[in-house]
Amino acid sequence: MSPVAVGGPALFIGTDTDYVALVRPELDPADPGVRRAAEQAGVTAEEFAGAGDTWAVLVEHDGEGGGFELPGVRDTEPADLAERLRAELAAATGGPFTVDGGALLRLDARPAGADAYAFTAHVTPPDADDPSGDDAGTPLTVETGPLPVAGLLADLDTFLGSLA
């Protein structure tokens, strides 16, 4: 856990151990942890905190975690994904559905008990086509356990509200 408090919009889909998350971290230059980290890095707290406008994808699966930044992604793109996921969940008739978030993220949902869905998140880092041969851009698949629809809808509303 980082000693630096991170705020900003975040949408987590999954459980504590298996999830995919869209986040736009925002650091507060006045936070004492940010000030200490900036001092250690030899920059001002404002420089260390940055603009707070870069989205990232975080993943955790089978104890393995990671993530990557999404340079150039605007708030409208994660908002669109969240709105489409919310619409599918609100209209869900108990069958499977897919929400396509473009080249980076696709969510396949399937019923998982009464009023719950499990997801398969297909995550493709932006450098997956990098010919360098390293595995930094390797596509990932994350399976979540059952997630209650009511909780997902509340999380989606909170996320969308944080972008307004």
Image (cartoon, helix red, strand yellow):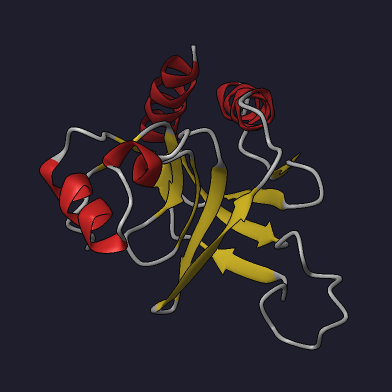
Q: Is residue 150 above or below residue 37?
A: above
Residue 153's image quarter? top left
| Residue 161 in picture, x, y percent from top left | 43, 15
Q: Closer to the camera, 7 or 114?
A: 7
Left/right placement of residue 145 relative to residue 97 reads left
* Residue at far top of view: 164
Residue 35 appears anywhere in the view: yes
Looking at the image, can residue 114 be seen?
no
Q: Residue at x 30, y 44 (%)?
A: 44
Count of numbered circles in the view:
0
Instruction: Estimate the x, y position of residue 147 in percent, counting from the top left.
Output: 42, 47
Residue shown at 73% from the left, 41% from the top = 101
Q: Which residue is drawn at 19% across and 46% down?
A: 35
Q: Which of the pair 43/79 is nearer the observer?
A: 43
Position of 78 relative to 67 (above/below): above
**Percent x, y of residue 126:** 75, 59
**In the image, is 38 to the left or to the right of 157?**
left
In the image, farthest residue toward the bottom: 133
Give the left or right position of residue 59, taking residue 6 as reference.
Answer: right
Q: Quadrant of residue 120?
A: bottom right
Comparing 71 with 113, the one in front is 71
Considering only vertical position in the picture, is 123 above or below 140? above
Q: Quadrant of the N terminus?
A: bottom left
Q: Residue furthest left?
A: 32
- Residue 64 in picture, x, y percent from top left: 44, 78
